[in-house]
Amino acid sequence: MGFDIRKEFIDKKKSEEGVWVDWKDGSGVKIARTNNPKYLQTLAEGLKHFQVNSRNKEITDLDNIAMRKKATAYAILVDWRGFVINGEEVPYSPEKALEFFERAPDFYMDIVELSVSRELFLEELVGESEKNSLDS
């Protein structure tokens, strides 16, 4: 019979636009896949900005982490729902996400971990019998 390679196919739309994941206390986060085009573009822009402003200074690990956090805030964590502070709803924005990444480093790590979870971004497989009925 063999291995059906379609089990490994990644859904481009899910990867780039994100998928909703249930989060803590009834909240949710919308996560795009790591290394999606927007993420890579944001990283490249951060690197270019760094190079222009640093005048040959080498990129440190802290600089690298800061650029990755920003790219994650702008291109990986694309939305949330049910986030509150003192009972007040906190609307999503990349700037607010970046602030939360700084103040709650484990939150950042959790988002990164979700973004590399390929199972979230796999294409939906249509079974052969379903496919045949859809094709008719």
Image (cartoon, rainbow, N blue to C red):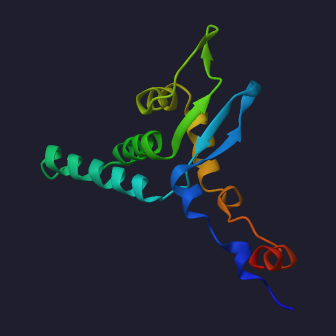
Q: Is residue 102 left or right of residue 24?
A: left
Q: Position of residue 89 (x, y in %)?
A: 59, 15
Q: Position of residue 96 (x, y in %)?
A: 46, 26
Q: Residue at x 15, y 43 (%)?
A: 53
Q: Is residue 2 left or right of residue 67?
A: right
Q: Position of residue 9 (x, y in %)?
A: 65, 72
Q: Nearer the viewer, residue 58 or 40?
A: 40
Q: Residue at x 14, y 48 (%)?
A: 52
State which quarter of the image contains the N terminus.
Answer: bottom right
Q: Nearer the viewer, residue 121 or 56?
A: 121
Q: Residue at x 52, y 22 (%)?
A: 91
State which quarter of the image contains the C terminus.
Answer: bottom right
Outermost residue on the left side: it is 55
Q: Is residue 64 left or right of residue 116?
A: left
Q: State whether residue 20 is above or below residue 87.
A: below
Image quarter of residue 2:
bottom right
Q: State whether residue 54 is above or below residue 24.
A: below
Q: Residue at x 60, y 41 (%)?
A: 30
Q: Position of residue 93 (x, y in %)?
A: 45, 29
Outermost residue on the bottom side: it is 1
